[in-house]
Image (cartoon, rainbow, N blue to C red):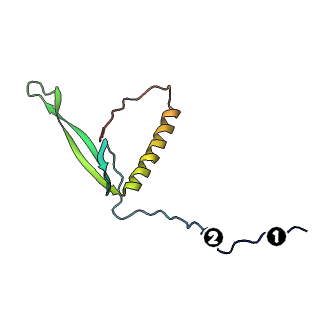
Amino acid sequence: MKKEKKVNENVMKIPKIPKIVVTESSGFKAVYASGVFGGLDPNDGRMIFFLDRIKPKIKKASKAVMELDKVERELQVEVHMSPAQFVSVSKWMSGHAEKFQKAFKGKKKSNESASYIG
């Protein structure tokens, strides 16, 4: 006959993981970003996403000809988080970027522009 092992009654049981319900706040919106800037310090991580818009100038001599007049950088949203969450998001994004690069390795590259300002 086998001896039963006595379970330590002082060991904490692992709690059941609660169901996560995703909702959208009344202010939720989706935005497109050309790039992001921000940073991390001991108290706060922040990212400001922006959208660049090219504003042409029509030459008076020939109304059919346009040239670059200016680029308007419109700030879309500013996100603040704890330094630990900032690092976690960084790792999450890097993981997705690596998967993307592996999936498209050797394929024709698109006209990408790096819009990161650190």
**Which residue is at the front of the view, 25 or 56?**
25
Q: Nearer the viewer, mark 2 or mark 1?
A: 1
- Label 1 sits on a secondary structure element that is loop
Quarter of the image for residue 9 reads bottom right
**Which residue is at the front of the view, 77 or 61?**
77
Residue type pointed to by label 1: Glu
Location of the C terminus (image quadrant) = top left
14 to the left or right of 117? right
Q: Which residue is mark 2?
A: 13
Q: Where is residue 38 shown, x and y percent of the image?
A: 29, 48
Neighbor class of circle 1 (other Cα within 10 Å; few <14, some 14-19, many 20+) is few
The residue sitting at 31% across, 42% down in the picture is: 35
- Label 2 sits on a secondary structure element that is loop
Quarter of the image for residue 110 reads top left
The residue sitting at 87% across, 67% down in the picture is: 2
Neighbor class of circle 2 (other Cα within 10 Å; few <14, some 14-19, many 20+) is few
Quarter of the image for residue 43 reads bottom left
Q: Is residue 24 above or below residue 35?
A: below
Residue type pointed to by label 2: Lys
Q: Which residue is mark 1?
A: 4
Q: Where is residue 32 shown, x and y percent of the image?
A: 34, 46
The residue sitting at 33% across, 35% down in the picture is: 114
